[in-house]
Image (spheres, coloured by chain):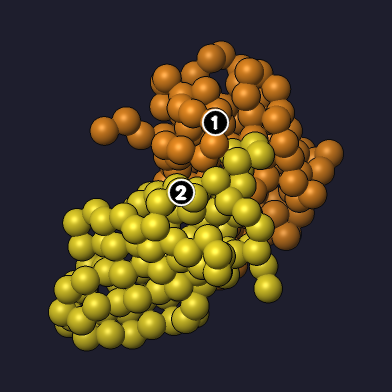
Chain colours: A yellow, B orange
Amino acid sequence: SQQGEEDPQALSIQEGENATMNCSYKTSINNLQWYRQNSGRGLVHLILIRSNEREKHSGRLRVTLDTSKKSSSLLITASRAADTASYFCATDTGANSKLTFGKGITLSVRP
Amino acid sequence: EPEVTQTPSHQVTQMGQEVILRCVPISNHLYFYWYRQILGQKVEFLVSFYNNEISEKSEIFDDQFSVERPDGSNFTLKIRSTKLEDSAMYFCASSEHFGGYGYTFGSGTRLTVV
């Protein structure tokens, strides 16, 4: 598997439900970031969690990081139709500031 | 909120032609990047730029690619002789700090090579 792999690849939920997306990576990281991309549009930074942090919240977003398992999860609570998008995790190893992205998760929130 | 601006938003070019994609990073940022995303695939790192020189480049960034910061505000990506497989969304990004913090991406340029 590659650095920054998300699962599931696609997720379809009803509005109001919670959405959980997972990301696994292979090498040591400096931080892990989650991005959202609406169809054909740019990347919007959602949240960053440092390697020495275990959990972080931002509004309806909750991200966790388990460095022993090299995994992270993004939870979107009380989802809305507007949350429909692709979500990517990206890791920064700290060596040179470049980000390594996963393949992304397509989230569909049904009204 | 400060933005990274990319122009044009769409560009169609003939195979073999040169293209220049333009970006205006956030003014106090010191680190600049280009990434690309082929349709339906993941975002891939192309090149990072700091202190007027390339910091790192990927295998994708071959001799057909070059970057420049010509005037202290613009950051450009040039593809010398485009190929069909260069068709992708190209994202510029900038950051204030080293270490991947405070990354801001532009909204991208969709390049179509025909």
Residue that appears at 60% across and 30% down: B76
What kind of element bears circle 2? loop
Q: Are marks 2 and 1 in contact (CB under 8 Å)?
A: no
* Left or right of B70 on screen, residue A51: left
> Mark 1: few, some, or many residues within 10 Å (few <14, many ≥20)?
some
Towards the viewer: B29 or A20:
A20
Q: What x and y, as percent, mark residue A111?
A: 17, 82
Label 1's element? loop
Depth check, front residue: A32 or A100: A32
Q: Are marks 2 and 1 on the same chain?
A: no
The residue that disc 1 covers is: B98
Query: Could you classify mark 2 by the number of other residues whose Cα lies within 10 Å: few (under 14), some (14-19), or many (20 or more)?
Result: few
> What chain does badge 2 belong to?
A
| Mark 2, residue position | A52
Image coords of residue B19 (percent x, y):
66, 39
Is A37 rendered above or below residue A12?
Answer: above
Which of the two residues, A110 or A55, is positioned nearer the viewer here? A55
Residue drawn 67% across the image and 45% down it: B46
Query: Disc 2 and disc 1: Cα gap in Å?
Result: 17 Å
Query: B9 left or right of B54?
Result: left
The image position of residue A106, as x and y in percent, is 42, 75
